[in-house]
């Protein structure tokens, strides 16, 4: 088997956090950069999807508050199965409140600090959101990382206002709780610019990718996953391209192969 340090090159040396290393090793083991956006609305739907695709998925991205029949016990069982299948658990919460509230929102009914390895946040309220989230994980003795939204995939998003992405990157690069950044997978040029700003030291994961579709529902934009990886994405976040496919397992395999080949082609 290829070694993660060879496949990832400079990114491997520069991304030293244990979560980044775990992610990069799983990518090599599964030959896939697919992060599954598991946007199903029932526990049964989620479980079935997980079962179908787990061989090709390196991280499970959830929206815990989408699930209609959510219960703590069913969720814990579901997460347990994803962990057993060697996936990082990534709750796409998009925190944005002041630090102490973001911290306490990781407790509450969903208690995400106890099961999420990674979570998204906007930096719109300033760096306290990162401090608060770090405290939440620390309070339960767990390691966790934040993916800051530096770009988004939806049309007309205000993160495109000049200077915003660069300001987010400047803060994230200095903060130990920042695992990486969300970039826009639908626009390779913008993504390449983001990679320039970020350098080698942080992950960039990208939603807004689909092999077949160009424009999604309600302003969602899509680009080619291969192009996203070539332009600097380290993980492709795929939702409907997999969970709405006729065969989710075949679709997951296709996204995995495309993303893995693109990583090898990128050569670092
Ligand atoms: P899709 O079905 O592949 O379009 O799903 C995309 C997922 O990524 C969905 O869960 C969104 O919440 C998530 N997402 C996104 O689409 N665009 C963004 O900029 C961010 C997250 Br941040």
Image: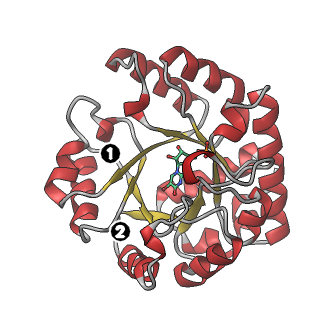
Residue displayed at 80% across by 47% down: 212
Q: Secondary structure at mark 2?
A: loop
As measured in the structure, the alpha-carbon distance from the residue carrying label 2 to the one carrying label 1 is: 14 Å
Residue at the (26%, 43%) spot, across then down: 106
In the rendered image, which quarter is residue 64 located in?
A: top left
| First in sequence: mark 2 vs mark 1 | 1
Q: Residues within 10 Å of mark 2 (few under 14, many from 20)?
A: few
For residue 235, what is the image quadrant?
Answer: bottom right
Position in image of residue 49 (x %, y %): 64, 24
Q: Position of residue 94 (x, y in %)?
A: 37, 52
Task: List x then y, in percent, for residue 236.
Answer: 66, 54
Q: Is the residue marked by circle 1 packed among few (<14), some (14-19), or many (20+) residues within 10 Å? A: some
**Side of 30 relative to 208 (left or right):** right
- Answer with left or right where residue 96 lies relative to residue 91: left
Residue 243 relative to residue 267: left or right: left
Instruction: Note whether 95 is above or below 16 in the view shown.
Output: above
Residue furthest left in the image: 100
The residue wearing badge 1 is 142
Q: Position of residue 113 (x, y in %)?
A: 30, 41
Q: What residue is rendered at 56% in x and 34% in y?
A: 38
Report which residue position mark 2 lands on: 176
Total labels: the figure holds 2
């Amino acid at each position: 088997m290829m070694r993660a340090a060879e496949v990832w090159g400079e990114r491997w040396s520069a991304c030293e956090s244990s979560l980044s290393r775990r992610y990069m090793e799983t990518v090599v083991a599964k030959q896939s950069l697919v992060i599954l956006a598991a946007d199903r609305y029932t526990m049964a739907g989620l479980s079935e999807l997980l079962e179908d695709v787990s061989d090709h998925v390196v991280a499970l991205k959830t929206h815990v508050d989408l699930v209609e029949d959510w219960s703590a016990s069913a969720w814990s069982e579901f997460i347990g199965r994803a962990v057993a299948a060697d996936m990082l658990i990534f709750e796409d919460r998009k925190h944005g409140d002041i630090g102490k509230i973001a911290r306490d929102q990781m407790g509450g009914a969903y208690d995400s600090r106890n099961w999420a390895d990674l979570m998204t946040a906007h930096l719109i309220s300033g760096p306290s959101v990162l401090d608060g989230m770090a405290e939440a994980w620390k309070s339960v003795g767990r390691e966790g990382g934040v993916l800051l939204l530096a770009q988004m995939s939806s049309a007309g998003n205000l993160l495109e206002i000049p200077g915003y992405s660069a300001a987010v990157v400047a803060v994230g690069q200095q903060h130990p709780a920042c695992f990486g950044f969300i970039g826009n997978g639908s626009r390779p040029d913008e993504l390449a610019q983001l990679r320039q700003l970020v350098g080698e030291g942080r992950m960039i994961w990208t939603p807004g990718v689909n092999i077949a579709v160009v424009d999604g529902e309600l302003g969602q934009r899509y680009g080619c996953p291969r192009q996203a990886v070539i332009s600097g994405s380290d993980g492709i976040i795929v939702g409907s391209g997999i969970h709405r496919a006729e065969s989710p397992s075949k679709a997951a395999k296709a996204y995995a192969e495309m993303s893995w080949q693109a990583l090898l082609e990128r050569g670092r």
